[in-house]
Image (cartoon, grey):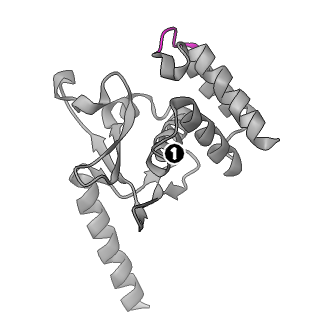
Amino acid sequence: MPVLFSVRYKVMLVCIAWCVSGQACAFTLSSGDIVECEVSLNGQTGVATEIWVNYTDIKDRHPELGRAVAVMRPDDKGWPTIIMDAEAYKRTGKGTPAIWDFVYFHECAHAQQPQLSEIGANCAAYLAMQSRGLMSYLRMKEIEAAHLSIMSLPIEYGGSGPQFWHQTVQCAKKSKE
C-alpha cells in the first residue's frame, strides 16, 4: 500500500508541476469527472495537449484564441493542442458549467478529427455530452441560450449563433437515426 501511495503522490506532483506551467493534465467536467482528449495521429495514440492561458492584461492573451474562449491548433510537431482561456473560465465557469463542458468536447472533437467542420465539432460535442449523461434538458437550454445570443458568426459557423445551434441540433438528431 505505501508503494501505491508513493506512486500516486509522485504522479500528482508531476501533474501539478505540468498544470502550473500552463499545461493541464486533464479537464474537469462540471460533473466532477476528469477527462482527457484521447487522440490517434500518424500511428501514435495519446492525449491532446491542453494549454490554459492566464493573463492580467487582455493584450497578453494568446493570439491563437482570437475572439474565441478555446481553440484547437496543432503544435509545431502536428500534435493536437487545445488552448483554453483560463481567465474567461474563471469569470464564467461556475455560472455556466454546461457551456464549458460543451466547449471542451467541441475542441476535443477537432483534435480527434481535424477535418471536422465547426458544425460537425459542435455535433460531436453534443453527442459526447449526451452519451455521458451531461445533456439534460436544462443543460441543453443553457448551451442553446449561449448560441442564440451570438448574432454574427463566420459562415463556417452557420453565419449566426441561432443557425449554428439549429444545425448542431439537426446533426445530433440525424446521428441518432
| 53 over 133 or under it: above or below | above
**Residue 36 visible somewhere in the drawing:** no
Q: Residues within 10 Å of mark 1 (few under 14, many from 20)?
A: many
Residue at position x 48%, y 9% from top? 152
**Residue 60 visible somewhere in the drawing:** yes
| 134 over 172 or under it: above or below | below
Residue at position x 30%, y 76% from top? 10
- Give residue 1's position: percent from left, percent from top: 44, 91
- Give residue 64's position: percent from left, percent from top: 27, 32
Pick the front one: 29 or 40: 40
Q: Amino acid at mark 1?
A: Ala
Pick the front one: 140 or 4: 140
Please state if 19 lies on the left or on the right of 4 as rendered.
left
Residue at position x 20%, y 53% from top? 21
**Residue receiving disc 1:** 109
Residue at position x 50%, y 57% from top? 34
Please state if 62 lies on the left or on the right of 28 as rendered.
left
Quadrant showing the C terminus: top right
- Give residue 42's position: percent from left, percent from top: 39, 62
| 54 over 162 or under it: above or below | below
Please state if 98 lies on the left or on the right of 141 as rendered.
left
Q: Which residues are magenta?
A: 148-153
Magenta-span inclusion, residue 162: no
Q: How many marks?
A: 1
Predominant secondary structure, magenta span:
loop
* SS at badge 1: helix
Pick the front one: 136 or 126: 126
- Give residue 74's position: percent from left, percent from top: 31, 46
Pick the front one: 149 or 138: 149
Res. 125 image quadrant? top right
